[in-house]
Amino acid sequence: MEKEEFGEGKWISLLIEGDRAAFSKLYELHSPTLLHKLNHLLPDEDSVLEIHQITFVRLWDIRHKIQREQGVWPLLHTIARNLVVDYFRKSASNESVRKALLTQATLYYEMEDPNDAIEQMSEALSTAIDRLPSKRKEIFLFCKFQGKSYEEAAAAYGVSIGTVKDHMAKAMRFLKSELGEKLFTLLIVLLGFFDT
């Protein structure tokens, strides 16, 4: 049988064994979809190309984790999602928060393009975060969007760890009451990517 006639499952089996031709074939199959998705999530072409490239390099590095019956896309998607989240967590400005929430909501729902419903959800989430008292909001963003520990937050803001915990607990209670059960659950899922 000629290799061109293989289905994706066979290419995956060869990839797991370290076959570079199989890797090239799977890259060819999935590269356009990943590029399309990243183009809608990231602000500039350099970031898109960098994350696209790193995603495939990491796929090669962890090829033994691919589950043949699930295909390559779930693993590619997870790698790309984590890289995009890392990209956004470098900054905690209001705009980056909005973009990070939009990005994660889009990836969470596995949609091809962000649509109005996702835009509205991300706006509601970022608006609710915006309504937190100033110091509480700063500590919440510092811990949840920059991935800092409570200890780091206490040192950065000159308060006790107990105060940080109190701010975080009150912030979560406020957001739950503001957002309602459904949106708050989505926020928890999204913030799971930023757990301290």
Image (tube, helix red, strand yellow):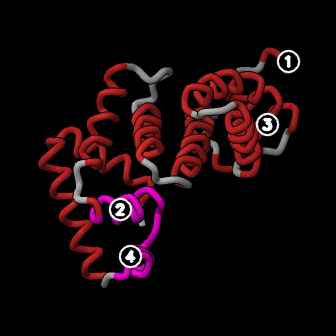
Residue on which the image places disc 4: 157
Which mark is in front, 1 or 2? Answer: 2
Mark closest to the chain's N terminus, 1 or 4: 1
Sequence order check, earlier mark of 3 and 2: 3
Residue pushed farthest bottom?
Answer: 160
Q: CA distance from mark 1 to mark 4?
A: 66 Å
In the displayed structure image, the side of residue 174 where residue 36 appears, left or right? right
Q: Few, some or many C-alpha atoms within 10 Å of disc 4 (few <14, some 14-19, many ≥20)?
A: few
Residue at the (53%, 47%) spot, across then down:
88
Q: CA distance from mark 4 to mark 3?
A: 53 Å
Q: Is residue 193 above or below residue 114?
A: below
Q: Which residue is mark 2?
A: 138
Q: CA distance from mark 3 to mark 2?
A: 49 Å
Q: Nearer the viewer, residue 186 or 13?
A: 186
Circle 3: element type: helix
Q: Earlier in the sequence, mark 1 or mark 2?
A: 1
Magenta stretch encompasses residue 59: no
Sequence-wise, the earlier of marks 3 and 1 is 1
Residue at 26% x, 82% y is 162
Q: Secondary structure at mark 2?
A: helix
Rounded to the nearest angstrom, the CA distance separating label 1 from label 2 is 61 Å
Q: Quadrant of the N terminus?
A: top right
The tag on residue 1 is 1
Residue under pointer 3: 14
163 over 167 or under it: above or below:
below
Looking at the image, residue 110 sits to the left or right of residue 66; the answer is left
Q: Return the x and y of residue 192 as percentages of the image width and height.
A: 39, 54
CA distance separating discs 3 and 1: 14 Å
Query: Which secondary structure dominates the residues rendered in magenta?
Result: helix
